[in-house]
Image (tube, grey):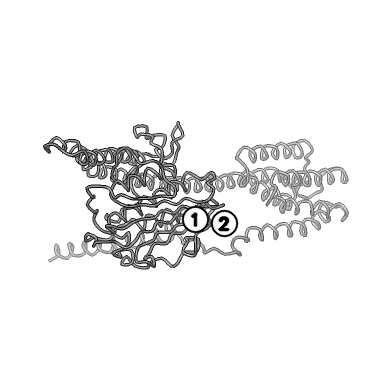
């Protein structure tokens, strides 16, 4: 029984000891290592140090005058200016700590010299060479100096303070005063060390914040590059493969047919050429996606591939100069296209020309896909501060193939116009067809598009009607809405006219994919 009692007593002692240790750890965490929440931002807290320094300056001025009068025996005409100089040194230290140090040192040395000169030596009981208010002033000024400048400057100021103290106290000292040299040097040294530590902590925190920001930016950039590389791999493995197969099949097809007609050879050659051109543009896009600096111009001035994407071909971006070739390729695919270019063409930004070309390209592609048998009209108006682009098509003569889902062609055109600060309207035309109207300004986005007599009629993109609010509007049967690619006619339509066009291409080809379309509606 006694053994059981001892075991029980030992167990109770262990339990009690464990609880006591746990309470001690909790007490240590609460009173020693617990971190306080940051104070809420407040204008009072921000100005609190300035208020304390103003109080110190006022106290030094008020208390220093009677001390110099009573203990040192200086007249009010000497005591008040010296005390005022010490108070001003405290205030000046908030903005100019180095001049404040010299002002504080000068005031204290002048007080000591006046006491020594007027009394023939230090007065009995007077704190010399540093008065009480002089010590407070000098400590505060050195603290502000250490907080505001690099560590070498307050160290030099501390050494100069020690030298002056040794000269005044060691060479001119006597037995009838209370020496304050050692105390002053010790307090000043503490102020310098404390100020340097606080300054170092502040700089370390600033460097940590900067490093954290740089790390976050680098992580975001790495994530973006990885995502772009993944997209590039998908494009290369899927799109490039199919385009290569199309090119090879178009090249081999004439040899599989007995006595192929010239028209068939011509169409197959057009398919092969467009597939190869699409592959070239796809390689350029892959170079941009895999580049770490896609916006950096190439050494030869070609934009878009970047300095570290040297393996990508430097293909120039299409401009409005290639509009005729685009129209000819579209006509070769069986679409009757009329072109009307008005206005005087001036120098245009490369981004504007590219966006205008892509908008026309996408609009004509949508007409081919979703308005079989329709005719299209491309109107290009060069205004003083921009370009007005409009592509309209007549109602289709036969139903369009069913769409596999809503695409992104119209969205891509709107994004291109928005990036330039322009507008785009796409919707049904009054005659039952479809119209895409865009205004692309050359001025900054905040500049208002100017009105011009050469601008198109009320349906122009300069005063667009509200854009369709649903995908259903964009998928109207007669419009460039989403849907699968229409089958190419076996022969081009005849009798097409144009107010402004170049000579027909020697070999008709499919619609020009000189670069990836903005966003295909059949995607």
Which residue is identified by label 2?
447
Q: Quadrant of residue 290?
A: top left
Do the CB atoms of the residues marked 2 and 1 lie less than 8 Å apart?
yes
> Can residue 20 be seen by looking at this rendering?
no
Characterize the local packing of mark 1: few (<14), some (14-19) or many (20 or more) Cα atoms within 10 angstroms: some
* Residue 443 in the image, given as x and y percentages of width and height: 55, 52
Which residue is identified by label 1?
421
- Residue 505, which numbered label? none
* Residue 134 in the image, given as x and y percentages of width and height: 74, 50
Residue at 81% from the left image edge and 51% from the top image edge: 82
Q: Secondary structure at mark 1?
A: loop
Which residue is at the front of the view, 257 or 58?
A: 257
Would you say 151 lies left or right of 28 here?
Answer: right
* Residue 102 in the image, given as x and y percentages of width and height: 74, 43
Quadrant in the picture for the N terminus: bottom left
> Can residue 267 be seen by looking at this rendering?
yes
Q: How many marks?
A: 2
Would you say 513 lies left or right of 6 here?
Answer: right
Would you say 254 lies left or right of 370 here?
Answer: left
Q: Secondary structure at mark 2?
A: loop
User: Which of the two discs, 2 and 1, labels the residue nearer the N terminus?
Assistant: 1
* Residue 228 in the image, given as x and y percentages of width and height: 32, 45
Quadrant in the picture for the C terminus: bottom left
Whether 183 is drawn above or below 398: the answer is above
Which residue is at the front of the view, 352 or 12?
A: 352
Gap between marks 2 and 1, in whole Å?
9 Å
Characterize the local packing of mark 2: few (<14), some (14-19) or many (20 or more) Cα atoms within 10 angstroms: few
Residue at 48% from the left image edge and 56% from the top image edge: 439
Which residue is at the front of the view, 180 or 406?
A: 406
């Amino acid at each position: 029984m006694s053994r059981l009692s001892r075991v029980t007593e030992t167990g109770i002692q262990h339990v009690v000891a464990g609880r006591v240790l746990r309470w001690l750890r909790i007490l240590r965490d609460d009173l020693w290592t617990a971190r306080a929440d940051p104070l809420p931002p407040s204008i009072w807290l921000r100005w609190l140090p300035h208020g304390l320094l103003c109080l110190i300056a006022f106290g030094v001025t008020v208390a220093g005058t009677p001390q110099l009068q009573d203990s040192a025996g200086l007249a009010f005409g000497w005591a008040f200016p010296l005390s005022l100089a010490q108070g001003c040194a405290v205030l000046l230290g908030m903005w100019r700590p180095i001049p404040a140090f010299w002002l504080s040192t000068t005031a204290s040395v002048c007080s000591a010299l006046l006491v020594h000169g007027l009394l023939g030596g230090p007065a009995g009981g007077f704190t010399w060479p540093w008065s009480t208010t002089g010590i407070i002033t000098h400590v505060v000024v050195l603290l502000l100096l250490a907080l505001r400048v690099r560590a070498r400057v307050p160290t030099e100021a501390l050494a100069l303070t020690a030298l002056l103290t040794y000269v005044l106290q060691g060479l001119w000292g006597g037995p009838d005063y209370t020496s304050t040299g050692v105390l002053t040097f010790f307090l000043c040294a503490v102020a310098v060390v404390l100020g340097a530590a606080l300054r170092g902590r502040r700089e370390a925190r600033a460097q940590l914040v900067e490093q954290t920001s740089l790390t976050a930016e680098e992580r975001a950039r790495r994530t973006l590059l990885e995502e772009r590389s993944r997209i590039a791999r998908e494009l290369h493995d899927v799109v490039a493969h199919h385009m290569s197969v199309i090119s090879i099949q178009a090249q081999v097809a004439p040899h599989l047919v007995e006595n192929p007609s010239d028209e068939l050879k011509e169409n197959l050659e057009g398919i092969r050429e467009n597939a190869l051109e699409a592959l070239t543009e796809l390689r350029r896009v892959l170079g941009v996606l895999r580049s770490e600096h896609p916006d950096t111009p190439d050494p030869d001035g070609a934009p878009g591939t970047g300095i570290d994407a040297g393996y990508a071909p430097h293909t120039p971006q299409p401009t409005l100069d290639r509009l005729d070739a685009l129209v000819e390729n579209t006509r070769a695919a069986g679409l009757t296209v009329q072109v009307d270019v008005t206005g005087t063409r001036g120098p245009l930004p490369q981004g504007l020309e590219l966006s205008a070309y892509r908008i026309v390209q996408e609009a004509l592609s949508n007409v081919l896909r979703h308005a079989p048998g329709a005719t299209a009209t491309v109107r290009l108006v060069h205004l003083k501060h921009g370009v007005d682009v409009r592509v309209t098509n007549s109602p289709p003569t036969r139903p369009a193939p069913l769409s596999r889902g809503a695409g992104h062609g119209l969205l891509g055109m709107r994004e291109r116009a928005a990036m330039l600060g322009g507008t785009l309207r796409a919707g049904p035309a009054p005659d039952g067809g479809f119209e895409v109207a865009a205004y692309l300004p050359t001025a900054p986005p905040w500049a208002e598009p100017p009105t011009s007599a050469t601008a198109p009629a009320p349906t122009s993109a300069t005063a667009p009607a509200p854009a369709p609010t649903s995908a259903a509007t964009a998928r109207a049967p007669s419009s460039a809405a989403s849907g699968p690619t229409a089958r190419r006619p076996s022969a081009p339509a005849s009798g097409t006219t144009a107010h402004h066009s170049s000579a027909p291409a020697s070999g008709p080809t499919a619609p020009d994919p000189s670069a990836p379309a903005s966003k295909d509606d059949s995607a």
